[in-house]
Image: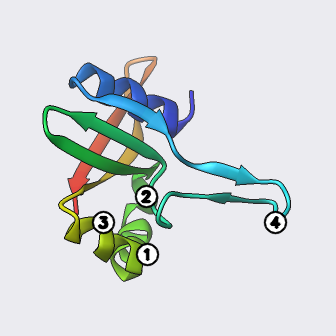
Amino acid sequence: MSPVERSMKHLRGAGWTVCVVERFNRFACVRQDAFGFGDLLAVRAGQIALIQTTTASNMAARRKKILSLDGYGAWKAGNGLCILHGWLAAKRGRRKVWEVREELL
C-alpha cells in the first residue's frame, strides 16, 4: 500500500471525505500536486484540507518546500488546512505496522 493509500484510509477513519488531487503529467513525466503540495483533498464539517503524504524521514524536506510555495500562502489565506503525513514502518514482533506522523502546517 502506498503512502497516499495509507493516508486516505487514515483520514476516512477520522471522518473525512477524501479524493486524490495529485496527477501524473505524461508529457513532462512528472507528478503534479494541487498548488504544488497537495496529494489529497479532504473535507468534513466545515473544514477543507490539502494533505501531503511522504515517508517520515522526508517530512522536513517536504515541510521546507511547502512553506516556500506561493500556493501554500494562498491556500492558508483562504482558510484551508495543510496537513503533512509522514509514514514510518514500525516492527511489532514479526509484524510491520505503519504509523503516521501528522503535522498541521
> Of circles 2 and 4, which is in front?
4
From the image, tell me which residue sits under label 1: 65
Q: CA distance from mark 3 to mark 2?
A: 25 Å
Q: CA distance from mark 2 to mark 4?
A: 27 Å
Residue at 46 percent of width and 65 percent of height: 35
Q: Is residue 79 left or right of residue 75?
A: left
Q: CA distance from mark 1 to mark 2?
A: 14 Å
**N-terminal-most mark, 3 or 2:** 2
Q: Residues within 10 Å of mark 4 (few under 14, many from 20)?
A: few
Residue at 37 percent of width and 49 percent of height: 51
Q: Amino acid at mark 3?
A: Trp
Residue at 21 percent of width and 71 percent of height: 77
Farthest residue to the right: give it. Answer: 27
Farthest residue to the left: give it. Answer: 46
> Of circles 1 and 4, which is in front?
4
Q: Is residue 83 left or right of residue 66?
A: left
Q: Amino acid at mark 4?
A: Ala
Tell me the colour scheme of the image: rainbow
Badge number at residue 75: 3
Q: Is residue 64 visible?
A: yes
Task: Please state the horizontal and vertical placement of residue 100, each as a whole percent of the image.
Answer: 32, 39
- Secondary structure under tag 1 reads helix
**1 and 2 marks in contact (CB < 8 Å):** no
